[in-house]
Amino acid sequence: MEVAVEEVMRIQKERGAINKLDFEEIVWTYKGVPLEISVWIKRDWMFCGLNNMDFITSNFLPDRPWQD
């Protein structure tokens, strides 16, 4: 398997930009549709110490249709 370093660097730059966003201002979407995320889940996340990308890639959200 070939992995282009340029692609890894592009992805990392994009991840960094997402992580710099104010979590409270992010409207997460899946296939163009905004996700309905409880204010309580968002508040809990803000104090767990992880980053914005982890919010989507971790098991924190109970309903994750993108993981099917």
Image (tube, rainbow, N blue to C red):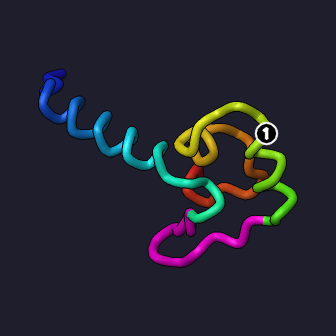
Residue 34 located within the stretch drawn in magenta = yes
- Vertical position of residue 15 compared to residue 66: above or below: above
Seen from the viewer's position, the closer of residues 57 and 46 is 46
**Which corner quadrant holds the N terminus?**
top left
Q: Residue at x 71, y 31 (%)?
A: 49
Quarter of the image holding residue 5?
top left
Q: Main secondary structure of the magenta part?
A: loop
For mark 1, what is the residue?
47
Q: Residue furthest right?
A: 40
Q: Which residues are magenta?
A: 26-37
Q: Residue furthest bottom?
A: 33
- The spot of residue 68 in percent (x, y) is 59, 53
Seen from the viewer's position, the closer of residues 11 and 48 is 48
SS of the residue at dot 1? loop
- The spot of residue 36 in percent (x, y) is 71, 72
Q: Residue at x 57, y 45 (%)?
A: 52
- The spot of residue 46 in percent (x, y) is 74, 45
Q: Amino acid at mark 1?
A: Phe
Residue 59 located within the stretch drawn in magenta = no
Judge the density around disc 1: few (<14), some (14-19), many (≥20) Cα neighbours within 10 Å. Answer: few
Q: Is residue 38 left or right of residue 9?
A: right
- The spot of residue 62 in percent (x, y) is 78, 52
Seen from the viewer's position, the closer of residues 16 and 53 is 16
Q: Residue at x 53, y 42 (%)?
A: 53
- Vertical position of residue 37 compared to residue 4: above or below: below
Q: Residue at x 31, y 34 (%)?
A: 12
Q: Is residue 15 left or right of residue 21?
A: left
